[in-house]
Image: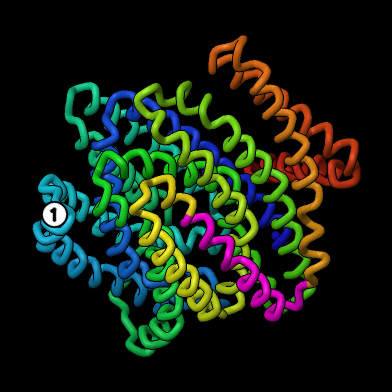
Amino acid sequence: MSIKNKTIQGVFWSGLQNWGSQAGSLIIFLILARLLTPEAFGLVALSNVLINFMQIFLNQGFAQLLIQKQDLKSRDINTVFWTQVFTVFFLTTITFTSAILISKIFRQSFLIPILQVLSLVFVINALSQTQVALLRRDFKFKIMTIRSLLGILIAGIVGVGMALLGYGVWSLVGQQLTYELTGVVVLWTASNWRPKLEFSLAVLRSVLHFSINVLGYKLVEFFNQRSDNLLIGYFLGEAALGYYAISHRILEVMSQLLIGTLNQVALPTFSRLQDNSQKLIEAFYRVTQFTSLIAFPVFFAFMILSPELVVVLFGQKWTDAIPILQIIPLVGILRAITVFQRSTFVALGKPVLQFKLGLLNATLNIIACLIAVQWGIVAVARAYVLSDYLVFPLGQWLLSQLISLSWKTYLSQFIPAITGTVIMGLTIFISQQLLTLWLEPQGRLIICSLLGIIIYTATLRLAFPRLFSQLFTMFSLLRESTKTSHK
């Protein structure tokens, strides 16, 4: 099967995984948000920040190597697997024993048992990451889709059930562990690969040489994306972090739905095209434009309609999150532009550029959020957005030097999305203001959303008919690939 057909099928199954799992997790998330308090979400959010930090050392960029390496051998895979298994024992021990110290730093004694229980995630993930990397390398996204959807379903039942029984914050912990455990069971059941007692120090040195820059980037990316959570948790407490975390959770869900689908397929696709610069550039332009056409209008509409969305979806107790949700989607718009920078850097074997760019971004973000935290969570959100936008031009310049991108051609990819989004945004805003005196939030949300969809679609159809036809062609190819994948 050609790379083109593999990519199309990969987009379909990756899309089904992202849309299905994120839609399912969002439903569960909304139910739990109505059953639990902001403080509960804040405690688990803070715990997960610390768990996610430790997990960086478990992965160490190994997954990217298994996907990107052209001549992959059995000893490469087994060396990566056993290295991760060996690492997990250190991470679990460190997390379990340091939980008391961490709880004292953040003045939250309840963090101790939560961190200790969540450290089991390391063991589960060590058994799944190699399998996931091999499946992504071979474009076998169907198995990962089943894994994700089944995990969401079973974990959702466990989480909601525990919440209804009054387990509070432990409902979120139980949900997370159940999801991870279900996923690893599905992977090992569906995959034919099994580890062998095979280990090579030469391979390990090669792996570490490649992964050190990826690991470095993951570390700076962590501080870039999570420093705001740490500062809010330390200075403003778990309730404020709960409001902020739920806003970021919505951003993550939307980013996965709108951006993650293509990004999961982008790395293996770009890696296969690394020796054909012209096709790589064309693929980069295409996925960038397609993602912007979807992401720009959705994030912009979310900013405008956040007052109605919060009240309708989460209830009145979460209204303090509205000002944050009117700012944070700006990060989503930028991610739709920059996410393929990272895939291209790694695909071309240049993770050092990714690391340096991330280091600058993290430094600016930490400084900005540290200054802003004294004015509250809304100021932190603004600082977080500002630092990301300041770094974007430099990242794009580095990419243009690497694969000879044309700035004019690149920026022209966004003209259709920006045109449609501006016209749609004005329509939604005017309608929202006019309907405020006449309709409840539910009615305003429905009418404004429908108007936005109609206006945006009509703008693309009338102003960019050729692009509109290309989108229909792409969806037709997706339908054909679906039929082929079932044969």
- Residue sitting at x 78%, y 30%: 455
10 Å crowding of disc 1: few (<14), some (14-19), many (20+): some
Which quadrant of the figure contains the N terminus?
bottom right
Report the side of 125 relative to 294 (left or right).
Answer: left
Dominant secondary structure (helix, strand or loop) of the stretch shown in magenta: helix
| In the image, residue 447 lies in the stretch drawn in magenta | no
Residue furthest bottom in the image: 202
Residue 12, x across and y down, in percent = 63, 45
**Observer able to see residue 177:** no
- Residues in magenta? 383-405
Observer-nearest of 178 and 483: 178
Residue occupied by mark 1? 103
- Which residue does the image show at 29% across and 51% down from the upper left? 48
Relative to residue 426, is residue 79 depicted above or below? below
Figure quadrant of residue 39: top left
Locate the C terminus and report the quarter of the image it occupies: top right
Image quarter of residue 157: top left
Q: Position of residue 213 (x, y in %)?
A: 45, 79
User: How far across and how far down the image is residue 188, in percent?
Assistant: 36, 53
Position of residue 237 relative to residue 289, above or below, is: above
Q: In the picture provided, is 386 more to the left or to the right than 149?
A: right
The foreground one among 94 and 321 is 321
User: Where 410 falls versus 399 (above or below)?
Assistant: above
Left or right: residue 157 versus residue 112 is right
Colour pattern of the rendering: rainbow
Secondary structure at badge 1 equals helix
Identified at 49% across, 44% down, the residue is 251
The residue positioned 64% from the left and 23% from the top of the image is: 432
Q: Amino acid at mark 1?
A: Ser
Q: Residue furthest top?
A: 438
Is 404 colored magenta in this rendering? yes
